């Protein structure tokens, strides 16, 4: 039997090649009975569509890029899982780029992707530098960009974030309610929108409780564990805080190491709450109180916004804000919890 291509298949079905092609791409504008007839005859003649060639004709790579600051953080692993699930359902592949929180790497990745390697980009920003206008070049190439979690406020693209101000306010208030009067706020980058917003929530919760804001208790940390160990050791020795709010997960882990090294007891001498999606938070000793972000949902929502932008002729500039959840555990309450417990 001669090889059956899409043209021969369309002739046998008395349909146009575009209709047959849309059936294989899963378009929703085709009558279900017609689609079933097309797929049945394709199976009968053992016809397999050449999606790669179709993508080339449409000038689509059927690939999206995910740019994140790190992979070690459980939050980003969960978010990527959410993005990939949506991409897979849409018939897309994903490429993952890790900036290590370095602005120059971020710029280099964007420059590479600007050349058309992907159809769209989902990014959590590195947070460095003030000039982000290089991202506007993506619009000239009609490559949509969606931010999630860490964003640049000066770039007008769709964004998916969490209620960072409210969460930070609630976590600080929780520490105050359990007796803390000298709360340190640990941050990696105050200039980044997410760090600034979380710090504002901390600041306002102190003010609301009548506790003076002390700049010495806002501890600038880094992305390096060894540096953080030295920074936090010095801060705890000099400032003697009785509470810690860590704006990112790695700073809580570093705090545990430092407290152990200095003989500072958690939660007797110091209480700790951290933004974290760490699945083993309840297994730490003591169990870590967390502000848990809906990482998977952040990823799925970001991907859905991206595909809306890809499929729409109109600009998409939505900003979705999802709610996080404060889960008090032993590190702040002093109350022993069962595995996975929230008491």
Image (cartoon, grey):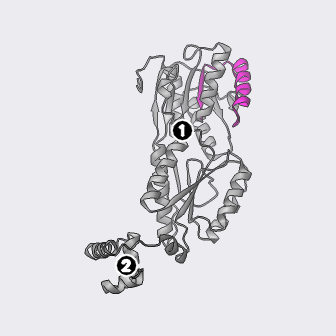
Q: Is residue 163 left or right of residue 193?
A: left
Residue drawn at 57 percent across, 26 percent down: 210
Residue drawn at 38 percent across, 69 percent down: 26
- State whether residue 204 is above or below residue 101: above
> Mark 2 = which residue?
20
Disc 2: CA contacts within 10 A as few (<14), some (14-19) or many (>=20): many
- Quarter of the C terminus within the rendering: top left
- Quarter of the N terminus within the rendering: bottom left
- State whether residue 52 is above or below residue 1: above
Q: Which mark is residue 74?
A: 1
Disc 1: CA contacts within 10 A as few (<14), some (14-19) or many (>=20): some
- Residue 202 position in % (x across, y down): 58, 33
- Residue 53 position in % (x across, y down): 52, 74
Residue drawn at 56 percent across, 63 percent down: 120
- Residue 138 position in % (x across, y down): 63, 66
Of residues 151 and 201, the one nearer the viewer is 151
- Part of the protein shown in magenta: 221-247
**Can the viewer see residue 215?**
no
């Amino acid at each position: 039997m001669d090889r059956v291509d899409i043209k021969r298949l369309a002739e046998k079905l008395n349909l146009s090649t575009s209709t047959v092609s849309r059936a294989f791409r899963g378009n929703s504008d085709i009558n279900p009975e017609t689609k079933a007839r097309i797929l049945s005859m394709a199976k009968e003649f053992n016809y397999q569509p050449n999606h790669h060639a179709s993508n080339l004709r449409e000038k689509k790579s059927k690939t999206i890029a995910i740019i994140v600051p790190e992979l070690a953080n459980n939050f980003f692993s969960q978010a990527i899982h959410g993005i990939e699930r949506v991409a897979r359902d849409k018939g897309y592949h994903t490429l993952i780029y890790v900036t290590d929180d370095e602005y120059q790497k971020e710029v280099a990745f964007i420059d590479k992707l600007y050349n058309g390697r992907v159809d769209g980009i989902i990014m959590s920003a590195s947070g460095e530098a003030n000039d982000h206008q290089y991202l506007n070049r993506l619009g000239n190439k009609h490559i949509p960009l969606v931010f999630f979690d860490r964003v640049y406020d000066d770039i007008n693209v769709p964004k998916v974030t969490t209620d960072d101000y409210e969460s930070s306010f609630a976590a600080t208030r929780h520490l105050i309610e359990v007796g803390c009067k000298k709360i340190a706020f640990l941050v990696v980058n105050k200039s980044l929108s997410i760090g600034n917003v979380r710090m504002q929530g901390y600041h306002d919760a102190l003010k609301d409780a009548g506790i003076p804001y002390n700049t010495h208790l806002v501890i600038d940390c880094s992305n390096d564990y060894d540096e953080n160990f030295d920074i936090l050791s010095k801060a705890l020795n000099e400032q003697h805080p009785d509470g810690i709010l860590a704006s990112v997960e790695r700073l809580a882990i570093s705090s545990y190491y430092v407290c152990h090294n200095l003989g500072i007891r958690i939660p007797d001498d110091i209480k700790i709450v951290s933004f974290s999606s760490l699945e083993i938070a309840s297994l730490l000793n003591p169990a870590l109180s967390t502000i848990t972000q809906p990482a998977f949902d952040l990823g799925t929502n970001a991907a859905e916004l991206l595909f809306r932008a890809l499929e729409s002729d109109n600009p998409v500039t939505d900003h979705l804000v999802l709610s996080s959840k404060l889960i008090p555990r032993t590190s702040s309450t002093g109350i022993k919890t069962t595995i996975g417990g929230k008491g």
